[in-house]
Image: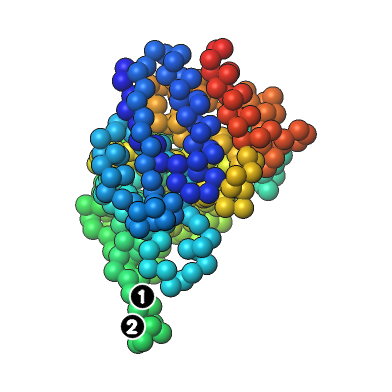
């Protein structure tokens, strides 16, 4: 099978972790006799520095022509620390989501036996936790009208959703629930926000169409609490853009490290696969960043973009073996800490020998 990828390393540790994911991708392609074609593109701060914009048209064309996109991270302190910057790396991410039609971000949250003691929660709370968070990605406050008035002393951000947008993401949530444990939690703030009341209204209309799925409704503040108190009570969670952004970052911590969780952004055109963590500028160039989330994102790429489940499973098996053997980076190491590149080499070697 021919696999055509667009590879966007981005900023900070992005190039380092992408290198390791591509080692796994190449090893799998060779193992299963796939023809692999990949091309690199610029996005984020590095694209601003070189081309003046965070998501250049040539990068977009590269993504549109690919079967899938493997993405690293964006963000740079020189933009983070300048509130008056007109062009920012994060604008590139939002533009990519909009132009590629990436309406759903899928973030699996699961724990690893060898890392349960690293979780800030007690073992009995997190052991066996396994749920999927589905975040709407192209609507809400991040894409609504925003600006300043009163000589810059008043700022506003508008949260807007349409019925079609809500139906689309809820449909995906129900489809995932049907394949898992048949439970869907719709997270909103319907007691305060009109946009959330639309979410709940649409969900209540759709629920009877999925009688095999138990639908529950939860305010976002309650959901934030319950993720910490009873993470095993969730199966599939679906929510709007900003709530999903916050809740999935919170949920990632229960696994023991932010560097372990992958994600897939699914949409109308080319899907994007990326780790949920940021660009971690403090670690840039030090060869210490955890590449596992990015490598697991590559596993999701094989599964979601190409329906190559055996290929994805082999990557997951290799990651599980590396953690069992403690071939891991310093953030989760018990004894010897391996370098980013060493973890990537070990996993690729495991795949080759499997």
> Which residue in the structure is indicated by mark 2?
149
- Could you tell me residue 14's position as x and y percent? 50, 43
The answer to which of 107 and 202 lies nearer the viewer is 107
Label 2 packing within 10 angstroms: few (<14), some (14-19), many (20+):
few
**CB within 8 Å, label 2 to label 1:** yes
> At numbered mark 2, what does the secondary structure look like: helix, strand or loop?
strand
Above or below residue 186? Residue 303 is: above
Which residue sits furthest front?
50
Element type at mark 1:
strand
Residue drawn at (48%, 63%) of the image: 79
What residue is drawn where x is 36% and y is 22%?
Answer: 36
Give residue 19's position: percent from left, percent from top. 51, 33
Q: Position of residue 219 (x, y in %)?
A: 45, 59
Instruction: Tell me if 2 is positioned left or right of 328 in this view.
Output: left
Classed neighbour count for the residue bearing mark 1: other residues with Cα under 10 Å, few (<14), some (14–19), many (≥20): few
Q: Which residue is mark 1?
A: 156
In screen coordinates, is 282 left or right of 44? right
Which residue is at the front of the view, 123 or 351? 351
Residue 337 image point, x, y percent: 72, 35
Residue 251, visible in the rendered structure: no
Task: Tell me: 16 left or right of 321.
Answer: left
- Residue drawn at (32%, 28%) of the image: 4
């Amino acid at each position: 099978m021919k696999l055509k990828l667009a590879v966007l390393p981005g900023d900070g540790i992005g190039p380092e972790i992408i290198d390791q994911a591509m080692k796994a991708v190449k090893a799998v392609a060779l193992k299963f006799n796939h023809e692999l074609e990949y091309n690199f593109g610029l996005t984020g701060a590095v694209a601003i520095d070189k081309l003046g914009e965070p998501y250049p048209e040539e990068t977009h064309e590269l993504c549109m022509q690919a079967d899938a996109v493997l993405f690293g991270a964006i963000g740079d302190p020189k933009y983070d620390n300048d509130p008056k910057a007109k062009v920012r790396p994060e604008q590139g991410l939002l533009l990519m989501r909009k132009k590629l039609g990436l309406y759903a971000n899928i973030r699996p949250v699961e724990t690893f036996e060898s890392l349960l003691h690293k979780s800030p929660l007690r073992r009995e709370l997190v052991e066996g936790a396994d749920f999927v968070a589905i975040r709407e990605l192209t609507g809400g406050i991040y894409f609504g009208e925003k600006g300043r008035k009163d000589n810059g002393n008043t700022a506003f951000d508008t949260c807007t959703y349409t019925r079609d947008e809500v139906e689309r993401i809820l449909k995906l949530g129900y489809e995932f629930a049907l394949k898992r444990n048949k439970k869907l939690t719709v997270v909103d703030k319907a007691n305060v926000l009109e946009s959330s009341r639309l979410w709940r209204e649409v969900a209540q209309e759709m629920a009877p169409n999925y009688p095999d799925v138990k639908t529950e409704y939860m305010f976002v503040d309650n959901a934030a609490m319950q993720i910490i108190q009873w993470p095993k009570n969730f199966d599939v969670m679906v929510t709007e853009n900003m709530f999903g952004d916050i809740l999935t970052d919170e949920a990632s911590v229960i696994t023991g490290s932010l560097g372990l969780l992958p994600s897939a952004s699914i949409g109308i055109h080319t899907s994007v696969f990326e780790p949920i963590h940021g660009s971690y500028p403090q670690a840039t160039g030090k060869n210490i960043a955890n590449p596992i989330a990015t490598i697991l994102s590559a596993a999701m790429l094989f599964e979601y973009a190409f329906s190559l489940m055996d290929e994805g499973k082999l990557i997951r098996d290799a990651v599980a073996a590396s953690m069992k053997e403690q071939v891991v980076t310093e953030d989760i190491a018990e004894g010897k800490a391996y370098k980013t590149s060493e973890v990537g080499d070990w996993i690729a070697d495991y795949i080759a020998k499997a």
